[in-house]
Image (tube, rainbow, N blue to C red):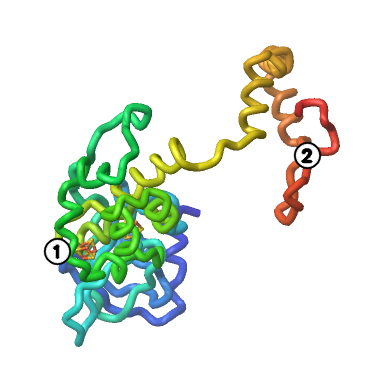
């Protein structure tokens, strides 16, 4: 059953009126905005991705009656409210700095150098209040202004880059590009190197897996499917030191 059919099937529950881009529709009251759009007959080709609050593709702006405030949320996570007025913002324009992280000198002034508008932040906290991931967006912007790369990276870690903070910012900052610059700089220059990753890269470079890969590439498709289906899968609640019973491919 398609997503649209699944939405249409929910006709037993009360219907509520909502307005999508100014047009009135009656929608089952438990649907998210994303499912309501499909229920109303919209085919989503932009502004949709994971449907699970992870990809940040479905930023949406809306108002509810009796409240002048512009509200924002992810369409796949926000349930409809009676009489809400909705517009989906699948993309909000920003100027992204293009850089090769290997060539960037990770000094404290890097954020203002790449995104000078960061200094226009007036500390209003609108970005934090807009964030569907409950990130303290203003705090990571402040850390970036101070040149504290590690703090900005840590505080922005859960950012899904939906752009809702950017859409609401009176200082016209591109917060999420500032956040990802911090995380890239942190990963490249500050985070401790993982010894086990280095060992694994060494094993790969020495050809440890070459024979196995050649063997797999020569295996007929049906046999490959059987190997894949029978493979040992790490249990969901395994301990940190879990390893498969067969050590043959480690
Ligand atoms: S919304 Fe913009 S100006 Fe306001 S605190 Fe956030 S980054 Fe600063
Ligand atoms: S920090 Fe901004 S771009 Fe990132 S998840 Fe929050 S609102 Fe979206
Ligand atoms: S569709 Fe991915 S966050 Fe909504």
As drawn, the label of residue 238 is none
Q: Nearer the viewer, residue 5 or 176?
A: 176
Q: Nearer the viewer, residue 170 or 118?
A: 118
| Secondary structure at numbered mark 1 | loop
Q: Is residue 60 above or below residue 192?
A: below
Number of residues whose C-alpha sits closer than 10 Å to that of mark 1, classed few (under 14), some (14–19) or many (20 or more):
some
Q: Nearer the viewer, residue 232 or 84?
A: 232
Query: Residue lying farthest bottom?
Result: 66
Q: Position of residue 17 (x, y in %)?
A: 27, 78
Q: Position of residue 25 (x, y in %)?
A: 26, 71
Marks 2 and 1, how far apart in space? 52 Å
Mark found first going from the N terminus, 2 or 1 = 1
- The residue that disc 2 covers is 232
As drawn, the label of residue 170 is 1
Q: Is residue 127 above or below residue 48?
A: below
* Mark 2 or 1, closer to the camera: 1
The residue carrying mark 1 has its beta carbon less than 8 Å from ligand 1: yes
Determine if residue 19 is in view.
no
**Rendering quarter of residue 114:** top left
Q: Residue visible at 73% across and 36% down?
A: 229
For residue 208, side relative to residue 91 (left or right): right
Q: Residue visible at 46% across and 67% down?
A: 9
| Secondary structure at numbered mark 2 | loop
Q: Is residue 55 above or below residue 95?
A: below
Q: Residue visible at 30% across and 71% down?
A: 129
Q: Position of residue 177 (x, y in %)?
A: 29, 47
Which image quarter has ligand 2?
bottom left
């Amino acid at each position: 059953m398609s997503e649209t059919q699944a939405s249409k099937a929910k006709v037993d529950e009360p219907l509520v009126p909502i307005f999508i881009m100014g047009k009135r529709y009656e929608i089952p009251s438990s649907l998210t905005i994303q499912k309501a759009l499909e229920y109303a007959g919209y085919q989503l080709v932009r502004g949709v991705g994971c449907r699970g609050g992870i990809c940040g593709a479905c930023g949406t702006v809306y108002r509810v009656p009796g409240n002048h405030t512009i509200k924002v949320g992810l369409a796949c996570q926000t349930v409809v409210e009676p009489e809400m007025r909705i517009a989906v913002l699948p993309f909000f324009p920003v100027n992204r700095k293009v850089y090769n992280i290997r060539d960037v000198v990770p000094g404290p002034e890097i954020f203002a150098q790449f995104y000078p508008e960061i200094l226009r932040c007036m500390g209003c906290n609108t970005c934090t209040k807009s964030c569907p991931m409950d990130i303290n967006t203003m705090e990571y912007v402040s850390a970036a202004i101070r040149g504290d790369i590690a703090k900005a990276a840590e505080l922005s870690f859960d950012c899904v880059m939906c752009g809702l903070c950017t859409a609401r910012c009176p200082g016209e900052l591109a917060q999420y590009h500032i956040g990802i610059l911090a995380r890239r700089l942190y990963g490249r220059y500050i985070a401790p190197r993982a010894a086990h990753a280095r060992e694994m890269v060494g094993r790969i470079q020495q050809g440890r897996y070459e024979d196995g890969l050649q063997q797999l590439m020569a295996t007929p498709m049906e046999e490959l499917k059987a190997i894949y289906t029978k493979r040992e899968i790490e249990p969901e609640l395994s301990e940190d030191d879990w390893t498969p019973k067969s050590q043959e491919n480690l």
